[in-house]
Every structure is written in structure tokens, then in C-alpha cells.
């Protein structure tokens, strides 16, 4: 009888061990599930692993990891798809609509976690039943006990994870892939989450101050302007700031602006979502010449090409209203990483511009480029006017027949402008041209306009 009891104990321990293995096996193999949350399609998966982590996978830029809990398993969340049309409506909707949407998303996340936990419980029960069947056990009572044990194990796992989950762990992230080269963007995102209410209040103040400033600008109208045949507005470095378009639109309506030149950095990361803000360009109702900056991308250029009033300037000349305009896009605008090109490459481009254009008999009236290092390395006298950006500092200087004009940042450096202790001014430049009897244009005056202290 003692041997029988010992054998029964060993078989019971073996069954319990197999039940645990079956639970882990089924959860590891079959937990991956797709869920839709607002405009995002997410895949959530659980696997036994050590150290215990949460992984957020963002194809194709890489993944981020954080040691968020104690129990030895890994939660992976993969972004599989983004509904850009829906996300665009979310981002550009009214504040009250966004608040309602945030509530809906929170509810969706709670339901997602509930459904996923129920699925894990079902997988655990199925794994326990499979393990008992594999051992040759066919007793319904044993299957019920195995399923009950699986439910308890999964509930303990879920409760233990919930109780030990540390959101602060996301402040100590590990990176893998392309995103490893620029982890600061995630720190910026976390700061934005922490300061979203503060930013909202500051934007309201900014909007009121800008409205007052532009009303004063409107009262100036064309009074006191120099006599000119053509007025060109130079903007740069908008960096996703929608206020910049209101600023430019008011200037266009208050002054006789014939067209706009933009020397790049419309966005921060060049994503398709950011590119949607360029729809505001159509509201300006004048031709809009654009040359890319290091924060732009092929997605931005593709979206701009759909705007009827946009003219892309990239290694070509355009004739517009009697002015010949040339320029080139930024060296890194064909990538999604905003890091500027190395200094030696910038120097080589400037030398190429000087060499090629010095050999031509006819040259453009204006040369557009984003990077200031290239612009200021263009030989004085090569072009009558060189316009550029990048530094976020308004500059106007004439050297030996060439006027170098930096519009500064028409978007006040975007979100980074709010992060600085002293908000950057919104700035742009107005260029005035006259034509002689032969129809040749000459730049006669430049006005630098900046609105400071709006934040």
C-alpha cells in the first residue's frame, strides 16, 4: 500500500508538472492576437522570458524595452498598422472631440486587457487539458481540475503583473534598431505627455497674443512700404506648428505678397501624419516654392506634390513672375532621420554649387537652400540673393553684391520652442523687387518680421 501511495504521489506530481508545462506551451505558442485601438492595429503577445520586460516594437525603426514587472514573462506589443485617415481626423479635430476620443481609447484599452486575459485563461485551460491527455489521463474530473488550476495560474500571473507593473520603468528604456541612434525623441514624447495640459494653456495664450499682434500688423497694411513691383515672403523651419500658417496667411493678406519661398523643415520627423499639416499651404492662395530641410522626408515631398500651389525646387530652375529661382533640397531629406549631413559633405556641396554656377553665363536671381553652412559658403556675387534657414535665427546680410537672408523659424521651432526657457520668436522675411526697363529684377529692400514673447 505504501508503494501504491508513493506511485500515486509521483503520478500526481508528474501530472501537475505537465499541466504547468502545457499552460506555458499554449500561451507561448498561441497568445499573439491582433487588436484595433482607435487608428492603430496592435499585436499583443506573451512569452516566458527573463528578464521580465515589456517590448514595444515599431517596424521598421526598431523596438524599445523596459523592465516593468517581476514575473518571468515578456509582454510584446507590435504596431502593425496605422489608419492615417482616422489618425489625421484625431490629430486635427477640435479639443473637445479629442478629449472624448481619449476617453474612448481608454475604454478600448481596458476592454483589450480584459479580452486578452480571458484568452490567456482559455489557452491555459486548453494547455492543461492537452498535457493531461498526453499523459494518457482521460478522466473528466481530472480535466476539470486541470482547467481550474490553469485559471488560477493565469489569474495569479495577471494579478502579479498588475501589482508589480512599474510605469516609471519607461524612463529607463533600452533601444534596438534605428531608433537606438535617436532615443531623445522618446524622452521628448514623455515630456510632452507630462506637460500636455501646460502646453494647451500656453497655446491658448499664444493664440490670443498672436491674434493681437497680427491685428496690429494688419493696421500697417501697405503703408510705408517701399515702392516695389514684386513682394516675396520667405518662411522657414515651421516644424509642425499650425500657428505659422496663420502668421503667414495674415502677412500675405496684409501686404501685397506675390508668392512664398519656404526653405524647409516643415516637419520634425517627416512622417506621413506630419505631412498632413501641409494641407494648410493651400489656404495661402499664392504660389508656394519649397526646398526641403533635414527634418523633411520623401513622404513630405510626396504630399506637397499633391498641393496645386506648391512648386518643389530641387536641382532645377523655375521662372515665376519674372524672377528666376534655383535651389536644391537637403542632403538628408531622402531619409527619416533628421540628423544633418556631415560637415565635409556640406562643404563639398557648397564647392560644387560655386564651381558649377560660376561657369554659367546666366544665373538665377534667387538661390534657395536649407542648411546655413552651405548658404554662407556660396561665394558672394555668385547670386544676387541666397535664402536659407536651419539655425532658427533671423539674419539679413549683404556681402559684395549678394544678400544672404535667413528667415529664422516661422514656426518658433515647433514643440521644442515650448521646451526652451525663453520662447523663440515667430519670424519671416519680406523681399521687395523692382524691374528695370529691360525687365531685369533687383532686390531693393528686405524686411525681417518677428513676433517675440508669444509663449
Image (cartoon, rainbow, N blue to C red):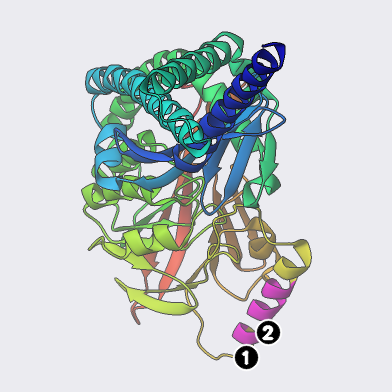
**Is 353 inside the magenta-drawn segment?**
yes
- Residue count near mark 2 (Cα–Cα under 10 Å), binned few <14, some 14–19, many ≥20: few
> Which image quarter: residue 101?
top left
> Which image quarter: residue 403?
bottom right
**Is 325 inside the magenta-drawn segment?**
no
> Percent x, y for residue 426?
47, 35
> Percent x, y for residue 286?
25, 57
The residue nearer to you, when weighing 98 against 400, is: 98
Residue 355, label in figure: 2
Q: Residue at x 47, y 30 (%)?
A: 137
Q: Please give left or right for residue 74 compared with residue 174 in the image.
A: left
Dot 1: what SS? loop
Dot 2: what SS? helix
> Percent x, y for residue 422?
61, 22
Q: Residue at x 41, y 59 (%)?
A: 299
Which span is picked out in magenta?
348-357
Q: Does residue 377 appear anywhere in the picture?
A: yes
The residue nearer to you, when weighing 322 against 118, is: 118
Q: Residue at x 32, y 48 (%)?
A: 276
The residue nearer to you, when weighing 82 against 35, is: 35
Please, is residue 315 above or below residue 454 in the view?
Answer: below
Please, is residue 186 above or below residue 265 in the view?
Answer: above
Q: Badges 1 and 2: C-beta atoms under 8 Å apart?
A: yes
Residue hosting label 1: 359
Amino acid at each position: 500500500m505504501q508503494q501504491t501511495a508513493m506511485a500515486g504521489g509521483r503520478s500526481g506530481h508528474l501530472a501537475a508538472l505537465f499541466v504547468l508545462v502545457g499552460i506555458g506551451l499554449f500561451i507561448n505558442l498561441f497568445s499573439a492576437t491582433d487588436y484595433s485601438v482607435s487608428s492603430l492595429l496592435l499585436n499583443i503577445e506573451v512569452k516566458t522570458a527573463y528578464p521580465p520586460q515589456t517590448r514595444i516594437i515599431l517596424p521598421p525603426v526598431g523596438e524599445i524595452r523596459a523592465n516593468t514587472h517581476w514575473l518571468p514573462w515578456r509582454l510584446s506589443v507590435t504596431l502593425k498598422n496605422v489608419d492615417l485617415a482616422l489618425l489625421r481626423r484625431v490629430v486635427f479635430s477640435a479639443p473637445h472631440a479629442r478629449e472624448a476620443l481619449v476617453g474612448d481609447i481608454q475604454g478600448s484599452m481596458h476592454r483589450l486587457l480584459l479580452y486578452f486575459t480571458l484568452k490567456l485563461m482559455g489557452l491555459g485551460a486548453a494547455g492543461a487539458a492537452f498535457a493531461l491527455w498526453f499523459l494518457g489521463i482521460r478522466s473528466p474530473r481530472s480535466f476539470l481540475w486541470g482547467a481550474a488550476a490553469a485559471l488560477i495560474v493565469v489569474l495569479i500571473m495577471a494579478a502579479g503583473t498588475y501589482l508589480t507593473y512599474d510605469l516609471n520603468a519607461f524612463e529607463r528604456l533600452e533601444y534596438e534598431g534605428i531608433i537606438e541612434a535617436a532615443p531623445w525623441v522618446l524622452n521628448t514624447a514623455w515630456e510632452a505627455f507630462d506637460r500636455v495640459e501646460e502646453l494647451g494653456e500656453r497655446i491658448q495664450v499664444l493664440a490670443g497674443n498672436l491674434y493681437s499682434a497680427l491685428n496690429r500688423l494688419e493696421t500697417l497694411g501697405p503703408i510705408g512700404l517701399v515702392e516695389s513691383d514684386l513682394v516675396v515672403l520667405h518662411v522657414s523651419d515651421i516644424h509642425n506648428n499650425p500657428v505659422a500658417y496663420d502668421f503667414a496667411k495674415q502677412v500675405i493678406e496684409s501686404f501685397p505678397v506675390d508668392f512664398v519661398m519656404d526653405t524647409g523643415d516643415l516637419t520634425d520627423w517627416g512622417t506621413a501624419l506630419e505631412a498632413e499639416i501641409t494641407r494648410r499651404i493651400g489656404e495661402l492662395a499664392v504660389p508656394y516654392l519649397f526646398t526641403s530641410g533635414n527634418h523633411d522626408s520623401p513622404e513630405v515631398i510626396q504630399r506637397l506634390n499633391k498641393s496645386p500651389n506648391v512648386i518643389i525646387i530641387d536641382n532645377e530652375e523655375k521662372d515665376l513672375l519674372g524672377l528666376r529661382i534655383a535651389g536644391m533640397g537637403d542632403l538628408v531629406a531622402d531619409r527619416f532621420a533628421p540628423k544633418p549631413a556631415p560637415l565635409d559633405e556640406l562643404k563639398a556641396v557648397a564647392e560644387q554649387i560655386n564651381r558649377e554656377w560660376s561657369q554659367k553665363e546666366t544665373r538665377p536671381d534667387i538661390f534657395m537652400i536649407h542648411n546655413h553652412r552651405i548658404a554662407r559658403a556660396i561665394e558672394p556675387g555668385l547670386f544676387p540673393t541666397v535664402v536659407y534657414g536651419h539655425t532658427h535665427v533671423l539674419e539679413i546680410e549683404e556681402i559684395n553684391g549678394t544678400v544672404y537672408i535667413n528667415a529664422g523659424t516661422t514656426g518658433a521651432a515647433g514643440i521644442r520652442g515650448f521646451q526652451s526657457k525663453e520662447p523663440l520668436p515667430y519670424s519671416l522675411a519680406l523681399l521687395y523687387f523692382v524691374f528695370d526697363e529691360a525687365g531685369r529684377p533687383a532686390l531693393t529692400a528686405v524686411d525681417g518680421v518677428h513676433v517675440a514673447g508669444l509663449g
